[in-house]
Amino acid sequence: MRTEISIKNTKSKFLDKVEELSGENIYACYQCGKCSAGCPSISEMDISPNEIIRLVQLGEEKEVLNSKAIWICASCFTCVTRCPKGVDLAKIMESLRQITLRKNVDYVNPLSISKEVLSQVPQIALVSSLRKFSS
Amino acid sequence: MKISYFPGCTLKTMAKNFEDSALASLSSLDIEMKEFKRWNCCGTVYSLTSDDLIHQVAPIRNLIRVKEEKDTRVVTLCSMCYNTLKRANKLVKEDSEKLDKLNNLMDREDVKYNGEVEVLHLLEILKNEVGFSQIAKKIKIPLKGLKVAPYYGCLLLRPPEVGIDDPERPTILKDFLGSVGAEAIDYPYETECCASYHTVVNVDLVVERAYDILNSAINRGAEAIVLSCPLCDFNLDNRQKEIKEKFSDFKGIPIFYFTQLLALSLGLDEKVCRFELNFVDPRPLLRSKHLIGEV
Amino acid sequence: MSRIGVFVCHCGLNIAGTVDVEKIAKLISDYPGVVYATDYMYMCSDPGQDMIKEVVKEKNLDGVVVAACSPTMHETTFRNTVASVGLNPYRCEIANIREQCSWVHQENKKKATEKAVKIIEAIIEKLKLDKSLIPLSVPITKRALVIGGGIAGIQASLDIADSGYEVVLVEKNQSIGGHMLQLSETFPTLDCPQCIATPKMVQVGQHPKIKLLAYSEVEEVSGYVGNFKVKIRRKAAFVDWDRCTGCGLCMEKCPVRVPSEFDELLSKRKAIYTLFPQAVPNKPVIDADNCIYFTKGKCRACEKNCSVKAIDFEQKDTFVEEDIGAIIVATGYDLMNKAEISEYGSGEYEDVIDGLQIERLLCPSGPTGGIPYRPSDGKIPKEVVFIQCVGSRDPEHYYPYCSKICCMYTVKQAMLYKHAVPDGQAYVFYMDIRCNGKGYEEFLQRGIEEDRILYLRGRVSKVFKDRDKIKVWGADTLTGRKIEISADMVVLATAMIPSKGAKKIAEKLRLATDDYSFLTEAHPKLRPVESLTAGYFLAGAAQGPKDIPETVAQASGAASKVLSLFSKDELSHEPIIASVDEEVCVGCGSCVSICAYEAIELDSLTKKARVNPAICEGCGACSAACPSGAMQQNNFNKRQILEMVDAFTKD
Ligand SMILES: Cc1cc2nc3c(=O)[nH]c(=O)nc-3n(C[C@H](O)[C@H](O)[C@H](O)COP(=O)(O)OP(=O)(O)OC[C@H]3O[C@@H](n4cnc5c(N)ncnc54)[C@H](O)[C@@H]3O)c2cc1C
Ligand code: SF4
Ligand code: SF4
Ligand code: SF4
Ligand code: SF4
């Protein structure tokens, strides 16, 4: 199948939203792959971090928002530290999560977390996980 | 010296061993950690979206509290709190528009915040104000022969604009270890992420990550790990249970907060270290090195 | 009996690691004619050379053999060494025991040592018969010819003329300027090419030392470095340029309208025309193929309108001859014809254009005033696809080389397109983006970040028309996707090739070219602006794809080579050349026809061959061809060669 690309992709609301929320220029990424090379979460991701940006550049909204990768990203800032173009990929990942969360769709329902887990993990883990995974 | 202190939630609950050992050590170094009143949870993660101001309220409100007590500096122990407070502070210092909006959001506060407070991590105080060479002079029990791998994790170092050291080749924990007489082990995973909050819903992911980190340190000869974040601590220490379940070859390794090693070397009562709260009991190791007495 | 000294070099371990140098020196010292032999770590070093000098004096040597590396490395060094102590330099020979022995026989040290001995013995035999030669001196005509009036030719001409020497600049078109004058703006600074080039063009036009021959072509070149005779054809313009004031009235009245070559067929010109308003010289020519008077016998509208009576339908081509000392070839480039590429429409779709066409569309002084209306219907294209490497880097179908400048001009064009059509979208299909110049990478990133050009990594496989759109089938190998874009216009960055007629002119000048007719430089690294033939220099895109900064640098480099040639009053010429024994020559002329340099002629009276020593390059082809043995190469004569063969083959 051919992917049709047109001005609808390159000037989409989705792309604008990502840039607005992240404050990053999506086109600044030149696809060197250094982010993916160092990402500690890469093996659990279905789409690698640089490819996430590439898909945003191509306006592939559905594929990006449906990916597991954006939720696996743990905001460790390794990529941010090393990106030669100064792209803050952690912010881009966050904006992609936020686009979903702001539709009131949780990635993790807080009520589904068991009592056992709640009593086991430190507060900072709980609070941050809810901040990242629920609306 | 007296400095305003932000403990954050976890130091008051699961990480009492971190707080107690820190407070005792600092007082023996003549630093009074003044816990400021009415602090609240900082939110633990800095909000990364540009329009999300509401999540900057929590960290900034803490800074207002510090200002209310006429202090200009606040120190944290937890890397996550440090990162969140520091970044929020940086944001409002650099963006006056956002600062105004935040002050408006908090119009019930008595004072307005104008970026006056400086956020510090305890390691910075030890390095820059006490000085590692001074610590080396003050210690009573050098941790001779103890091979410790520093683990920095993410938020002490990244992003670089708030990191306390070189994000790629940090030395602050290594230098600290030197000052207390321990041997620092160099290994490639010292700044790799432990998978952080995934520990709540995706234990497997944490197990994989922690296994890699710990095994790398063990293979390079480490007998223990030292770190400064209660979440990293949980993932590297408590999760060793799940690691062992998954990887039968995994031997286990004790995890210390850096303040525990500090207290120990300063010759303080072992009780302030609260080793009973460490998941992997470090005492057999310490005993084998004659750093604590027999039971 | 000869008094020969042999000096064996270790070249560190390069030679001594394989060949037993000490043993050789011992063995050779007993060879007939040798009075001294020794070995040393580095003969080419100062102490090594000093040692040779000492021995020459002390032992009163009449010949020296240095057994070392290839003569292309240090023959000159050692010849100068012996000359400094009064020995004729041609009595110094090099025995190559490195490239031809130690390097290639590392696995067998014993045999290598034996072979080295033979090489040295053979060279000794040659040396015994070597004559003391004296280099020839030839006077130089200090006048340069520059062929091609693009930015390369312009720069070279100005550099030479500004140094006080005369230049004849030959340009085949009616104006100088070349392709640079067609461009919209230039990377990486986006300055206007007309603004920076026209002042130089005017300087050329006004320079008292430059004789500008526009609408002219080199017809014939004879002679040799320092002393060329050049015949130039001045093509009939059918306008007397001496009378013409450049008012342009003739052009206004001409009823003919044909596609303009300068505007890359995107506008129409008259049959009597200049290339562009700032042309130098600003004089029109009549294109006889399209002129109604020439084709049908009536009209002469231009003539009626010319108040100074400059139109001259009877004008014929004329010829001038110039004496020239050095020649710079700067004939530039053309773009490969897009019609050759069938998968991109064989040039049949109006809205599939090439790089120079979009330059004209984007040029503020171009046919559309800088707004890129598309050719088919004049609409403003909202989505434009640029395809890089068209015909380049395609060894299977077209050209294997990278055209070097298209990555950069594509960013520039996409950027300028966005500046003209801010709500449009530019896409670029690329293989890699090669931006290796000062400020180039930054320029590219600016195009991507600020003008949001979407780069897609992959070649386009097919382009076809679909109603009023041009469909582009490409790939994005970064995501592994096949991509389809419905574009309003497609721009092909077609390969840069040598200008039309480059091959012909190279043949006329007897210059070496590569497989694609780009001129070949004497050495790709160390002699980049010289040709292999003495007296010829290269500048600009004629030598290989290059952009303006590089072209100008090379032009100035070529000019400085010419100036260093002109700084001498006489040229010295190698004496190792062919010479005829007139008593033996039978006048068969085999040598005449084989000489690539046309250095030999048969004397009209004696019918004997005669070598012009200033032209002969000493290649030896004639002596090999001569059936009578009359033609011999100095210091490489038949007897010497046979003696060497004997020395090699004796047990
Ligand atoms: C689409 C495109 C865009 C470009 N954009 C840029 C840019 O932005 N910046 C940049 O630096 N470079 C750019 N370039 C490259 C630039 O055009 C060349 O580097 C430059 O023009 C080379 O100059 P030249 O004098 O060697 O050749 P040319 O410009 O080709 O000049 C050669 C001259 O020689 C004449 N000639 C040819 N044969 C003969 C003959 N037999 N006898 C007499 N005269 C002859 C021709 O008529 C012509 O006047 C671009 C090129 C292309 C194709
Ligand atoms: S490191 Fe930066 S530029 Fe490179 S692919 Fe990742 S985000 Fe893009
Ligand atoms: S911030 Fe996210 S994407 Fe970047 S390296 Fe860390 S986990 Fe990977
Ligand atoms: S004579 Fe030829 S050039 Fe002159 S006006 Fe007529 S068609 Fe044009
Ligand atoms: S310069 Fe760029 S576009 Fe041109 S042939 Fe080379 S790689 Fe291809």
Image (cartoon, coloured by chain):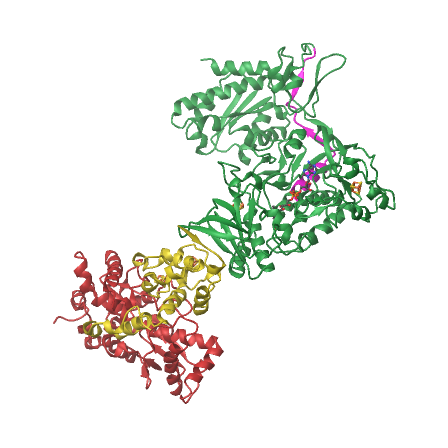
Q: Which chain is yellow?
A: A
x and y percent of residue C314 in the render?
Answer: 83, 34
Q: Magenta span has C306?
A: no
**Magenta residues?**
C556-582
Please state which of residues C639 and B293 is positioned toward the viewer in this rendering.
C639
Q: Which chain is red?
A: B
Rendering quadrant holding ligand 1: top right
Instruction: Give the answer, above or below, for where C478 lies relative to B225.
Output: above
x and y percent of residue C3 in the render?
Answer: 57, 19
- The extreme left residue here reads B295
Please state which of residues C203 and B163 is positioned toward the viewer in this rendering.
C203
Q: Is residue B149 left or right of residue C507?
A: left
x and y percent of residue B40 in the render?
Answer: 32, 82
Q: Which chain is green?
A: C
Please state which of residues B128 and A129 is positioned toward the viewer in this rendering.
A129
Counting every numbered tag in the picture gives 0
